[in-house]
Image (tube, helix red, strand yellow):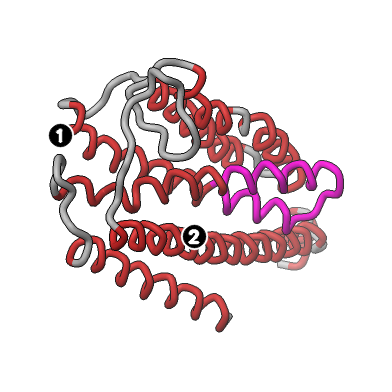
Amino acid sequence: MKSLTWLNIAAAALLATSLALVWFAAPLEASMGAVQKIFYFHVAAAWVGMVGFLITFVVGIIYLIRPNPKLDWLGAATAEVGLLLSIITTVTGSIWARPAWNTWWTWDVRLTTYTIAILIYVGYLFLRGAIEDPTRRARFAAVYGVVGFISVPLTFLSIRLWQSIHPAVIGTATPTSQGGFDMAPIMALIVILAQVTTVLVFAALTATRYRLLELQDQVDAQRALALQAESDLPSHSPATASVAK
């Protein structure tokens, strides 16, 4: 598919451009220095990953109302890419936390709820891999994707509901939440570009994974037909075979 190829090329080109701007054009942050540059893609990966889970949630509801294999493929693709971005968020956040909090990891409420969300969607993938029948797999995955989504708003609201050392980048945090960002215009521009880049990368990865799931479904269908045709072939009894021999 040419459109998918061009989408992947555009995503790769924009990602390379964004990374170059982050490392060579964005000024160093006064207190944290170079490690602050993680911020540009750390935040983008976090919210785009959650959007992936949101899409899985929505298509899961639609699938339960009107089953369609395409919805199942989309739900699976967005869950996988959302999980990938969430893992990237966790890794980059840990690298950032080392100089900022003097530790690689702390069981802060945001980090805890985020880890739970990641484990829930790891379970989603295990569930899909454990069920062979496509229809049952799609139905169970849709239910799981709908129920498991509760971890996403819980993660977002965690620093507003409980005391946390994690900064609230979007919206108003509770008085006990700490942190914030005051960016120069060039930094704000690169932040926006990083958001757009991450969305495009998400779209490219999701479209690619969707296509692979579609092809896998076609292969499975052909295999099932081949097995059915083989089982329908007339079999020769030993006696018949002996006479023929």
Q: Which residue is mark 2?
A: 199
Q: Is residue 72 magenta?
A: yes
What secondary structure is marked by label 2?
helix
Closer-to-camera residue (121/154): 154
Closer-to-camera residue (114/157): 157
- Asked if residue 120 is positioned above or below residue 206 in the image, the reply reads above
Question: Crowding near pointer 1: few (<14 within 10 Å), some, many (20+)?
Answer: some
Q: Is residue 203 magenta?
A: no
- Asked if residue 25 is positioned above or below residue 151 in the image, the reply reads below
Q: Quadrant of residue 132?
A: top right
Over which residues does the magenta segment extend?
52-79
Q: Main secondary structure of the magenta part?
A: helix
- Asked if residue 172 is positioned above or below residue 139 in the image, the reply reads above
Rounded to the nearest angstrom, the CA distance separating label 1 from label 2 is 28 Å
**Residue visible at 46% across and 16% down?**
162
Residue 108 in the image: state x and y as whole percent: 35, 20
**Residue visible at 65% across and 39% down?**
131
Q: Residue furthest right?
A: 66
Dot 2 amino acid type: Val
- Is any atom of residue 236 visible in this view? no
Residue 43 in the image: state x and y as whole percent: 39, 46
Q: Is residue 94 left or right of residue 35?
A: right
Residue 29 in the image: state x and y as whole percent: 18, 48
Which numbered dot is residue 210? none
Q: Residue furthest bottom?
A: 2
Q: Which residue is mark 1?
A: 99
What secondary structure is marked by label 1?
helix
Q: Is residue 157 left or right of residue 42?
A: right
